[in-house]
Image: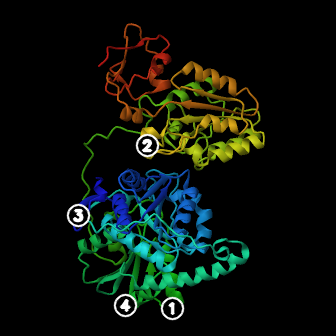
Amino acid sequence: MHRILNPKTGATVLLLGNEAIARGALEAGVSFATCYPGTPSSEIPLVFFQIKREIDDFYFEYSTNEKVALETAAGAAAAGVRTMCTLKHVGLNVAADPLMTLAYVGVKAGLVIVNADDPSLFSSQNEQDNRFYARLSGLPMLEPTSPADAKELVKDAYLISEQTELPVLFRTTTRINHAREGVKLGRLGKRSLKGKFTKNPMYWVQVPAVARERHKDLLRRGEMARKLSNESPHNQISGRGRLGIITSGVSVNYVRDAVNDLGLKNKVKILKLGFTWPLPDQKIVRFLKGVDKVLVVEELEPVLETDVRALAQAKGLMVPIDGKSVKPFSRLYEYDPGMVREAIARYFQIDYQPPKKLNLTKVPPLPARPPNLCPGCGHRSTYYAVKKVLGEGAVYPTDIGCYTLGLLPPFKIADYLICMGSSVSSSGGFSRALPDTPVVAFIGDSTFFHSGITGLVNAVHNNHNFTLIILDNGTTAMTGHQPHPGVNPEHFGDTTTHVDIEKLVRGLGIEQVYTVNPRNVNKVTQLVEQTTKEPGVSVIIAREMCALLAARLAPPKKKLVFEIDQSKCKQHRDCLRLFACPAFYLDGERVKINPNLCIGCTVCSQVCPERAIKPKAAA
């Protein structure tokens, strides 16, 4: 039995924040879940994927993209089934189209949309603050402060969703998703996958005449949500004194620690917000009337600060309210306990001496460890072959995935990136604007299904001229080896249907489609030379399973590793300078291969001009 299904009510279990959210959903009786995997939210759907094999009355799917995930979840919720949809902050951009109208449509059973923001960009291409989506859509938003709080809060999110008949946005941040805490388990809820849909086109079908009325109803339900926010136990005033702090999310913990460390327990009143939208306006006004000045502690944008200031102005309250103007607060990156402690001391003019920094002058700097493609990764050999043919003489739009690391030396083969799927679409623009320059785009297999297909359709329709290389490693590797439509479902013990990428691409009318094993460097080189000279759209599918996944699914009984024949090595160091597999290292002046890292992919033996790299005896 999966530990998230532990039936011991009252037991305390150490859980990751994402695991706590999944447990909370199960205690709420969620029966239907969808997602497109994205760090920092990926472990929530992983739990659902694992448990769906153990329980019959639960449905989960890895959807093709976030838009599809939300639309699928919306259908289940409209039919009266409690549902969860998980995605990361940029994923909600993809799902924004259905989100905005889903607010009008509403739900008949609880729908919670877990949306994980990523302050400090640990695994993302931007640092957007998705609290704005609650204000834009008119949907309620809840924000947990810890894993244990998240487990309880997600249960209340379902109640709020059903009371208001609205989806609820459940905003987390990386620090909440990936923290661990002892979480007290509650009773698992009753699940039901069998729904009932009552037809009513003048309610469900958002043509203008219907949508006008539904917008009115959204505003009415928004006021209902505001009342619930003012009454919510998740919006708490604590402490006493004439100094005020308003905060939410993980910053609540930093504030509490800082107030304790600075000896301000009897001087500071804290308003902790968990149900953050609609604003609990009555509770905030009551709080403002009881303090002389207020500091708003929030990561990223001054969202609460702006709202609280506007509310104070509307009510004629002259209390000073500050936030981002207080150093070292910033609109950039995560906060930390020391930063919050310093800002509180500065704003409230408290004598404070920060802890002395350790003297590290005699400690040598840590060696740089930039992210790197794994030993044996098929992307590395593909990049090597492309760079060998075209060098700097081409434009290389790239996409979101492990292969984005192609931007690093020695390949430097990533020139443009916006978002998932943009490599294909932007290549059309480059090929038209730079007719004399080869354009070679890269996209992964999962990203291709996510949002690359439409760009490729557009390229065929509009007669664009570029080569697309689909890096097919048989999984969604970057976020943790989740399946997608192009994988072999047997690898994951799944019953979904495989969609063949090559057949799909040919079905678009593209004739120049070639599937190749990227470990065959000469073949990849030949295809790159050929396709970049062909007019129109050409597609190379470089297919080789992710080395890490392959080792997990079918570890070899005998490991083949390579070594360098030092008598043949001429010290060209192409293996280091041009290929740069992490298994290579310098021992003095000689290049050697670390047998613990080498997986025996054979590519380096093709790179060496002297053919000095040979297999050694099997380990």
Residues tagged 1 and 2 counted as in contact (Cβ below 8 A): no
> Foreground: 475 or 273?
475
Chain-order first, disc 3 or disc 2: 3
For marks 1 and 4, give the CA distance: 14 Å
Category of crowding for the residue at label 4, using alpha-carbon neighbours closer than 10 angstroms: few (below 14), some (14–19), many (at least 20): some
Disc tally is 4
Residue 579: percent from left, percent from top: 48, 25
Compared with 274, 193 (above or below) is: above
Observer-side mark, 3 or 2, equals 3
Category of crowding for the residue at label 1, using alpha-carbon neighbours closer than 10 angstroms: few (below 14), some (14–19), many (at least 20): few
Instruction: Name the mark on residue 84.
Output: none
Instruction: Name the mark on residue 290.
Output: 4
Instruction: Name the mark on residue 315.
Output: 1
Chain-order first, disc 3 or disc 4: 3
Observer-side mark, 4 or 2, equals 2
Instruction: Name the mark on residue 481.
Output: 2
Residue 296: percent from left, percent from top: 42, 75
Disc 3 target residue:
8
